[in-house]
Image (cartoon, coloured by chain):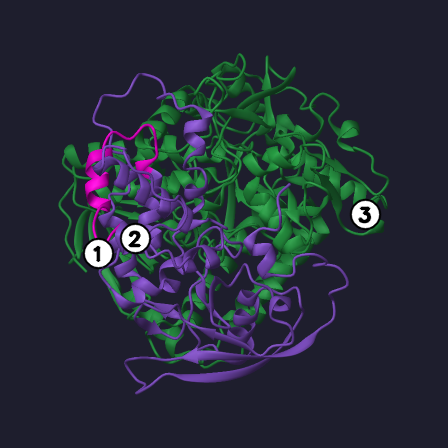
């Protein structure tokens, strides 16, 4: 049987949406900063009448619509598939539409932008460097042989190797939470490396050698020290550290001709 | 920002990205999006994309065509439907070749599952036609298309809002944009513009749609004199999570889930004896609300149960991971062991900007094409979905007609479309519009007007409609439009001004609400998703025609356009 998933452990899922009409006053401490105007960031407090079942994103919109329209943040789908509203909630990177008020008890709830990125305004950060690193991993199928007239075949067990990795929504929570990324801006970071995993382990891809040499670098997979913050924060419950460990093993095996086997989880910590 | 391109694609959802892939490297191309490309709403599509591949059991494009025609209650243009379903297998294989990680069957072929309204042998029983990647099909296709664009070096202008279209002597010559990060207005000249901005589900209080689905291009095209087709046809998906509208994919029923009322009865057996829970969405949504009206909602309330407990935890984990996660987070239930509380949620617009089969915008009832202007995807109306879209036909529409629009734009440029210039067209209206909003100090507030609009549309223009209710909706919309003229914007800073953007979006929604209500008032019959309690049956002799709404001064004028009927004559629609 499956135990509770990381997301379930982090939040009180059971009993939601039952008897939760009760409103309560919660204090939100929200990071405010306009680099073009303000000398330094500040926290602004808002009291919001909310229900325990409200999403944090709902609360931010209530603040904007009812109290302070000058607050800026990103949002789109509001149910955890687009990845727009990543931010730091009570110190933990998460997407605001997937976290509910009751996950934080009575409050106060502190909202900050994602760390490791330059703040554009308030909760909006510049993700250019995130997508630049994603681009570097060559995130597309490299298969120069002409494909057959119909689909390429891929067995379910081959497809299963990277199934969890295609859950990634590029929200950047993992990269923002990564202690290595914090120290080394050149490190590709967990999200880009996970996309590298997705293509390296896709049986249709024909560029393993090229991918392995790209990944075999101190700023690529060997930058990962196995801290596992990526796995802890991933809103799609992807065990990022595990898959990065698989890359390490694959790169290592390729270099040593498959003679030595590294431990599967974590890697070179 | 460079100020002239060959082609500008507005919208980076699946239709826009597919068109971009077609043009990348061959023309000077830019894609404009109000969100970052991978944040588009196509990514929220869960269940699959249809094609008669026959990977699981016998299937034929003729059956797919029949189902699509019948699913749309015989309003879809059959020449366009035939084009789409015949191209479907090629389109799916092409996506696979690009790298889309479809789920696979035991033989290694693309896996397929059952979906609402898709049948074998002209309606005999459900058929497995939906190709899928677990229940994140839209997201993985969007990611793959975006990655193809990235590989080809396609230029994106992200977080830019369309404010106006530029015309010169009847030809579309560019766009006016508001750049969110700076608040600056940009004019971009072009030889061709593709509108691919998606739908306007934010018209309604309960919706599966993202915040950005406010129909911007629809409203702008309409203001510029282009008609809107079949806008009364709005799909309510039967299974949104109660109170939130978050979508629980039809794939849940395709995999064996069933709907139950308060006594545990599988009530769809009464409404659609042949295909039961896999009936088309309009029929299932009405059935749920009938159960509720007749007191058979759960605990007598406004919802029913979607029961997936028969599917089994492993299969749910493998094929329905996303919706199981949604149910746990937002409804507090583990669907492997407990039913999910659901009710209908606004999901999709069948209507839109009329186009021919190559995405060329058709500018008036005579069929005149607007030179340089193209549309594809949910904002367009080809029309392949008629009065009600079948599940998984939307993604097919996006990739088939996105590609065709790309090819048509290529031909338009190759055949000598005049060069682009930033000097062409008049941006004065767009500038004055934005400046006026930034200076607006009226008494009305955007959130309140929007809330009243969404509530009125929900109350009077959703699943069940009638003359008196629609008339109330019209009065309300006109009242809100008048109040909108007294709007106040309190944020004066141009940069990152969400209040300004939401005011612009509300302007679009108000214009479109009027078009939807007028179109609904004009159609005195029930067909597909448009159900009139005062005219409860379909009326082919008088009403088998597309609705065209045209702007005439400050009024909306309604006219008709014939339906293309080729292979299948209208018959009674039962399942």
Closer to the chain start, of discs 2 and 1, is: 2
Q: Residue at the location (23% across, 21% down)?
A: A146
As drawn, the residue found furthest toward the bottom would be A39
* Nearer the camera: disc 2 or disc 1: 2
Disc on res. B32: 2
Q: Colour of chain B?
A: green
Q: Nearer the viewer, residue A39 or A116?
A: A116
Q: Quadrant of residue B212?
A: bottom left
**Residue B383 visible to the viewer:** yes
Q: Colour of chain A?
A: purple
Residue annotated with mark 3: B298
Does A215 appear in magenta? yes
Place of residue B299 in the rendered image (x, y in percent of width and height, measured from the top left): 84, 50
Q: CA distance from mark 2 to mark 3?
A: 45 Å
Q: Is residue B156 left or right of residue A30?
A: left
What are the residue bounds of the magenta stretch? Answer: A199-220
Closer to the chain start, of discs 1 and 3, is: 1
| Callout 2–callout 1 Cβ contact below 8 Å | yes
Closer to the chain start, of discs 2 and 3, is: 2
- Determine the chain carrying the residue at label 2: B
Instruction: Give the SS element for disc 1.
Output: strand
Does B108 appear in magenta? no
């Amino acid at each position: 049987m499956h135990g509770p998933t990381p997301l379930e452990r982090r939040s009180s899922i059971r009993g939601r949406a039952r008897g939760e009409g009760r409103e309560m006053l919660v204090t939100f401490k929200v990071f405010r900063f306009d680099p073009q105007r303000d000398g330094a960031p500040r926290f602004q407090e808002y009291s919001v009448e909310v229900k325990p079942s409200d999403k944090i994103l709902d609360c931010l919109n209530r603040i904007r619509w009812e109290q302070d329209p000058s607050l800026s943040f990103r949002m789109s789908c509001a149910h955890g598939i687009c990845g727009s509203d990543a931010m730091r909630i009570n110190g933990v990177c998460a997407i605001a539409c997937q976290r509910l008020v009751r996950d934080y008890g009575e409050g106060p709830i502190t909202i900050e932008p994602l760390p490791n990125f330059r703040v554009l305004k308030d909760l909006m950060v510049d993700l250019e460097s995130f997508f630049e690193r994603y681009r570097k991993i060559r995130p597309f199928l490299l298969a120069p042989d002409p494909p057959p007239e119909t689909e390429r075949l891929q067995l379910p067990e081959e497809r299963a190797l990277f199934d969890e990795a295609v859950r990634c929504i590029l929200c950047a929570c993992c990269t923002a939470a990564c202690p290595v990324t914090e120290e080394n801006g050149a490190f590709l970071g967990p999200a880009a490396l996970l996309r590298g995993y997705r293509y390296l382990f896709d049986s249709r891809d024909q560029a393993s050698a090229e991918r392995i040499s790209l990944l075999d670098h101190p700023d690529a997979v060997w930058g990962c020290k196995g801290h596992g913050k990526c796995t802890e924060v991933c809103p799609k419950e992807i065990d990022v550290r595990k898959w990065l460990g698989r890359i390490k093993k694959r790169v290592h095996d390729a270099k040593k001709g498959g003679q030595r086997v590294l431990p599967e989880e974590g890697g070179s910590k | 920002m460079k100020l002239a391109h060959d082609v500008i694609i507005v919208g980076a959802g699946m239709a826009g990205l597919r068109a971009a892939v077609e043009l990348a490297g061959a023309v000077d191309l830019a894609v404009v999006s109000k969100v970052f490309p991978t944040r588009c709403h196509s990514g929220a599509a869960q269940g699959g994309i249809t094609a008669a591949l026959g990977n699981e059991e016998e299937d034929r494009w003729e059956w797919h065509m029949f189902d699509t025609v019948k699913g749309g209650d015989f309003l879809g243009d059959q020449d366009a439907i035939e084009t789409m379903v015949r191209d479907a297998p090629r389109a799916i294989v092409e996506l696979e070749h690009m790298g889309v990680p479809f789920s696979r069957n035991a033989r290694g072929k693309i896996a397929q599952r059952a979906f609402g309204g898709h049948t074998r042998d002209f309606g005999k029983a459900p058929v497995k036609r939906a190709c899928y990647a677990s229940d994140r099909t839209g997201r993985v296709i969007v990611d793959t298309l975006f990655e193809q664009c990235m590989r080809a070096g396609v230029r994106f202008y992200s977080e830019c809002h369309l404010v106006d279209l530029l015309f010169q002597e009847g030809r579309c010559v560019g766009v006016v944009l508001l750049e969110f990060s700076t608040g600056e207005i940009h004019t971009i000249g072009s030889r061709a513009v593709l509108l691919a901005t998606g739908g306007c589900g934010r018209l309604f209080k309960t919706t599966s749609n993202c915040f950005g689905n406010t129909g911007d291009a629809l409203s702008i095209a309409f203001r510029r004199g282009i008609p809107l087709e079949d806008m009364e046809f709005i799909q309510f998906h039967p299974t949104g999570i109660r109170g939130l509208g978050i979508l629980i994919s039809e794939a849940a029923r395709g995999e064996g889930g069933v709907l139950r009322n308060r006594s545990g009865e599988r009530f769809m057996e009464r409404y659609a004896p042949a295909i039961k829970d896999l009936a088309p969405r309009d029929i299932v949504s009405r059935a749920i609300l009938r159960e509720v009206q007749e007191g058979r909602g759960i605990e007598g309330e406004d919802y029913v149960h979607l029961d997936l407990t028969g599917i089994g935890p492993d299969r749910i984990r493998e094929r329905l991971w996303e919706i199981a996660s949604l149910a746990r987070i937002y409804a507090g239930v583990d669907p492997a062991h407990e039913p999910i509380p659901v009710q209908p949620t606004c999901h999709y617009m069948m209507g839109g900007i009329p186009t021919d089969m190559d995405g060329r915008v058709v500018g008036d009832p005579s069929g005149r094409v607007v030179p340089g202007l193209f549309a594809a995807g949910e904002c367009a109306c080809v029309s392949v979905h008629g009065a009600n879209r079948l599940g998984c036909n939307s993604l097919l529409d996006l990739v088939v007609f996105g590609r065709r629009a790309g090819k048509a734009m290529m031909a338009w440029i190759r055949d000598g479309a005049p060069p682009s210039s930033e000097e062409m067209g008049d941006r004065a209206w767009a500038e004055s519009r934005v400046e006026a909003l930034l200076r607006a100090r009226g008494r009305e507030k955007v959130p309140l007007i929007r809330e009243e609009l969404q509530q009125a549309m929900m109350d009077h223009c959703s699943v069940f409609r009638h003359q008196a209710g629609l008339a109330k909706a019209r009065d309300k919309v006109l009242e809100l439009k008048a109040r909108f003229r007294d709007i106040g914007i309190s944020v004066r800073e141009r940069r990152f001004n969400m209040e300004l953007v939401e005011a612009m979006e509300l302007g679009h929604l108000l214009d479109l609400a009027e078009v939807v209500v007028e179109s609904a008032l004009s159609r005195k019959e029930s067909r597909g998703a448009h159900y009139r309690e005062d005219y409860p049956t379909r009326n082919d002799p008088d009403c088998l025609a597309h609705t065209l709404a045209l702007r005439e001064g400050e009024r909306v004028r309604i006219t008709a356009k014939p339906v293309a009927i080729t292979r299948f004559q209208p018959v009674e629609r039962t399942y």
